Amino acid sequence: MVEDASRYSRRRLLSMIGATAGASVMYQAASSLGFAAESPYRGPVKLEGSPKGASVLILGAGVAGLAAALELTKAGYKVQVLEYREKPGGRSWTLRGGDRYAELGGATQEVGFDQGQYLNPGPWRIPYHHHAVLDYCHRLGVALEPFTQVNYNALVHARDAFGGKPQRYRTVAADFQGQVAELLAKVTNKGALDGAVTKEDQEILLEALREWGALEKDLSFRPGEACSQRRGYVKDPGGGLSGVPEHSKPVALGDLLKSGLWRSIGIGAGYEFQTTLFQPVGGMDQIPRAMAKALGEGVITYNAKVTAIRQTGGGVTVTWADGAKPGTTRTASADWCLCTIPLSVLSQIDKDVSPAMDAAINAVPYHASVKVGLQFKRRFWEQDEGIYGGISYTDLPITLISYPAFGYGSPGKGVLLGAYSWGPYAYEFTALPPEERVRRAVEFGAEIHPQYKAEFETGVAVGWHRVPWTLGCFGAWTEESRAEHYKNLCAIDGRLLLAGEHASYLPAWQEGAILSALDAVTRLHQRVVSL
Ligand SMILES: Cc1cc2nc3c(=O)[nH]c(=O)nc-3n(C[C@H](O)[C@H](O)[C@H](O)COP(=O)(O)OP(=O)(O)OC[C@H]3O[C@@H](n4cnc5c(N)ncnc54)[C@H](O)[C@@H]3O)c2cc1C
């Protein structure tokens, strides 16, 4: 029986998706369901009119804080940014060999990757329609390269399907599409669609199904040239006398349906995952690095952990602990404060805000997520299996394996994303010490790529609710919490306003963080010039 999704509430739909389709689909759905609209960004903001010497304290130097700092500085404001970490970027973060990362609880990892290898523990891909992020990249000279989301030669895997043997994405996609097309063609020819489709349109539909499903002239999906052109050959066409191709045979529909592997083949069709996606050359932190460089020296104070935000009628005074001089507390004051600290952290900071804003700050829990990066001695996925970039999906707790989208064919080492999990699997992974997370990612991954055990060298694991400066992955709004609190969260509250991915309709994307910053500085500027 086909169930009608429109009968379900958004939350129920999400939990159904989570239960049946795996965490990566859940992420896609949670971050975009209902919000899948092209970014409204149409070019740099224009803050016209004099700020009359006004000063702004920006809390947090993620992409939201950095974009706000760039625009406010350009408009003539006196800007100071206070950032907890020793560098800019927040979640737009890249781990390389030599980096040291201490998580909540004290576990510390020394990243052992070779030069040129890296892991983006947070953002790793940029959709082509995230115009604001791309515009900052273009304006600041951040080089981009394609990120491969869908690779037909990557694998789909489920423990209980096909004896645990991974299947090619290509064969599952072709067999599913071909057999669905064949079934639909059959019911059309039996007249089952007569009430819904005119006779004339049925002819067109049959023609479309033949093309869409790679069906033969008799509308069957069976071994032959059309079918092999989609799912691949047993023996590829070659040259001369030995070049006769051998056609492959589709998997029976029942086996395919029961395998559940069809769950993994639609993800790339999602609006945020359609080609072309991009990644900055050399790691996601190239974006905040370029933004911080454009701001110039002295604007950002690093190692500054904000502990209190006081409003004094005419301005804001912030107390911060100076990480460069442990035990030292300092204050900073300005006429206005733009706070981009994640709500998971801000909710625990002593602050003067209205009850409505306070309720909003406390209303948004954060999703859990874990990423594990694994370095291998050689790029066996390319050399042995012809997998260049893209993602393999599994129902194992690692959820997916993503192959590096650069350096294709290079003879040296490579770093894979060896786990990217959400929900319960993320909690389970994060509850383990980092070295155990890495060990398990290798163990699970070896079920898909047996080469793992011989080729593995070193790894790093980031469990996002143990990251001290975000305590979670991204803000989990519901329709109800958004209806009740979103406006209050974004309102100018005395001399304070908030920005960040949590203050956007594009949660979990850098685009949302930047758009929220641009919206906030525009409203702030309107207020300042009108005073
Ligand atoms: C696992 C994961 C995958 C993601 N994938 C993608 C993706 O593929 N593409 C994409 O575009 N986006 C992705 N995102 C989302 C993206 O990372 C965020 O939307 C964006 O980076 C948020 O920017 P921000 O400036 O709002 O917050 P942040 O980047 O979190 O910046 C907030 C800053 O505040 C600082 N701070 C915290 N506490 C204090 C304090 N007490 N005092 C001073 N400073 C403080 C933090 O150190 C941080 O620098 C992903 C995120 C995660 C976690």
Image (cartoon, grey):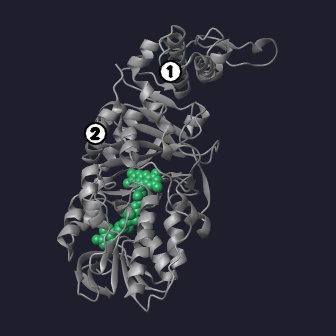
Residue 57 at least partly seen: yes
Badges 1 and 2: C-beta atoms under 8 Å apart? no
Residue found at x 59% / y 69%: 140
Residue found at x 57% / y 31%: 152
Quadrant containing the C terminus is bottom left
Crowd band around label 2 with a 10 angstrom C-alpha radius: few (<14), some (14–19), many (20+):
few
Q: Amino acid at mark 1?
A: Phe
Q: As drawn, which residue projects farthest toward the bottom?
A: 53
Q: Is residue 276 above or below residue 233?
A: below
Mark 1 vs 2, N-terminal side: 2
Q: Is mark 1 within 8 Å of ligand 1?
A: no
Residue 521 bears which disc, if any? Answer: none
Q: Provide residue 283's location: percent of width, then percent of height.
A: 52, 57
Q: Is mark 2 within 8 Å of ligand 1?
A: no
Q: Amino acid at mark 2?
A: Ser
Mark 1 or 2, closer to the camera: 2
Q: Provide residue 238's location: percent of width, then percent of height.
A: 75, 19
Residue 9 bears which disc, if any? Answer: 2
Foreground pick, 223 / 104: 223
Badge 2 marks a residue whose secondary structure is loop
Q: Is residue 382 above or below residue 158?
A: below
Q: Is residue 59 above or below residue 190?
A: below
Quadrant for ligand 1 reads bottom left
Q: Provide residue 428's location: percent of width, then percent of height.
A: 26, 42
Residue 141 at least partly seen: no
Foreground pick, 129 / 441: 129
Q: Which residue is mark 1?
A: 176
Separation of marks 1 and 2 at Cα, in angstroms: 28 Å
